[in-house]
Image (cartoon, helix red, strand yellow):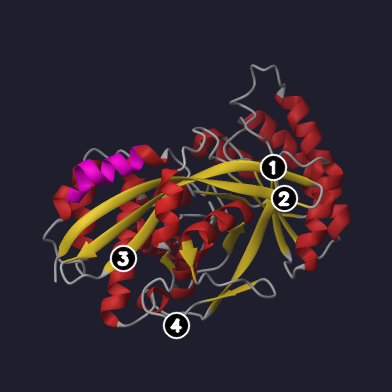
Amino acid sequence: MKIATVRATPLNLPVTVGSGTRTKSTFLSLCLVEVALDDGRSGWGITAITEEEVVASIVNDIASHALVGMDPLRHEQVWDRLFWLLAPRGQSGYASHAIAAIDLALWDLKGQILGQPCWRLLGGARESVPVYATFGFAFFDRDELAAAARSWVERGFTRLKMTVGHHGLQRRDEPRPLADVIREDVERIRAVREAVGPDVQLYIDANCSLDYFHAQALAQRIEAFGITFFEEPVAQNDIPNLVKLRAKTRIPLAAGQNEGLASRFRDMLAAQAVDVVQPNACITGGFTQCQKIAGLAAAFNTSFANGGAWPHHNMHLHAGLANGSLVEYHSVAVECCKLVFDDLPEPTGGMLALPGVPGLGFRPNRERVAELAKRPGSRGAGKA
């Protein structure tokens, strides 16, 4: 039983965001990786939030040749070989994404070989996980944002996340003053809080789009709205700025969904920079590295949750590990997954039940993937 082939398929998927009178057509990209064995079995992994063609090239042109003939159950050996091949001096970025996708495919295979779902192989701590719905995007105006929030609560979600900052630093030369951006964010948060009442947990996410000065100003002006956590408030997840911000606000801080190295989480934890660490199994080196980061979080008695979407993969991590917790049900990413995969579980009452099927419990539809791969898409639009 050896690895026979490793193949990546880049996809830029058409999705419609929103509902009712306010919708937006966009694209979201991901890279699908298949690891096939010499006995005909296949495992599947994904990565996202980056340029899918670059990751596919790394997998197809570099990583795949190094893995042929290896034992798929020796995922620590595979992970270490990939690290020294793709990131020998501690680089992150695309290397981490490629490793994550391959690692998830190997865990999918491991589950199939051993006849167990991945969440059980990771520890089997619980059979369902709590989810929060990411619903609040920049193209909604205040009234539409409030209506969308009420709609998600009516669907049984009591934990909601909305974006803030809206690529503020990236777009500051339009001109688009950051002071105006956060002033509008305050009113948008106010509208959502008034729409859903005090008992719904509300999270905000700046996607690393603010500097310290404006992140602090925003945090101080919204403390009264009962924010459960402020995710990626500052550019580059800059640790000294996170430490300063955490000392200036009562709102808990979260970060880490796009980090590629366990050492970055060690540094965040040692500096007491965040209240919640958020490795993403589809980005942060797969289950193999994420379970080690979860161990770091446990040692520091710090919360460990999922940021960065892709709930159907991350649910296995948080169901498997004792300190697992929240999984992000990102509405756009979920729609992308529905295009690619069959048999995805749906949340009920704000909880996502884990499948009992060996491996990940869902598989891509090859015919649909083949058709989607032919679409030209729209480069640069896939970062909703």
Q: Secondary structure at mark 4?
A: loop
Disc 3 marks a residue whose amino acid type is Gly
Marks 4 and 3: in contact by CB < 8 Å? no
Decide: marks 1, 4 in contact (CB < 8 A)? no
Q: Crowding at label 1, few (<14), some or many (≥20) Cα neighbours within 10 Å?
A: few
The question of residue 371 being in magenta is answered with no
Pick the quarter of the image with the N terminus: bottom left
Looking at this view, is 290 or 53 the one in front?
Answer: 53
Q: Which mark is residue 356?
A: 4
Please tell me which of labels 3 and 4 falls first in the chain: 3
Image coordinates for residue 37, horizontal then vertical, percent: 19, 66
**On screen, residue 242 above or below 315:** above
Q: Main secondary structure of the magenta part?
A: helix
Q: Is residue 119 above or below residue 89?
A: below
Q: Is residue 292 visible?
A: no
Q: Is residue 59 magenta?
A: yes
Q: Which residue is under mark 2? A: 18
Residue 248 seen from this side: yes
The numbered dot on residue 24 is 1
- Mark 2 and mark 4 in contact? Answer it, CB < 8 Å: no
Q: Nearer the viewer, mark 2 or mark 4?
A: 2
**Of callouts 3 and 1, the N-terminal one:** 1
* Start-end of magenta stretch: 54-64
The reply, left or right, for residue 309 in relation to residue 103 is: right
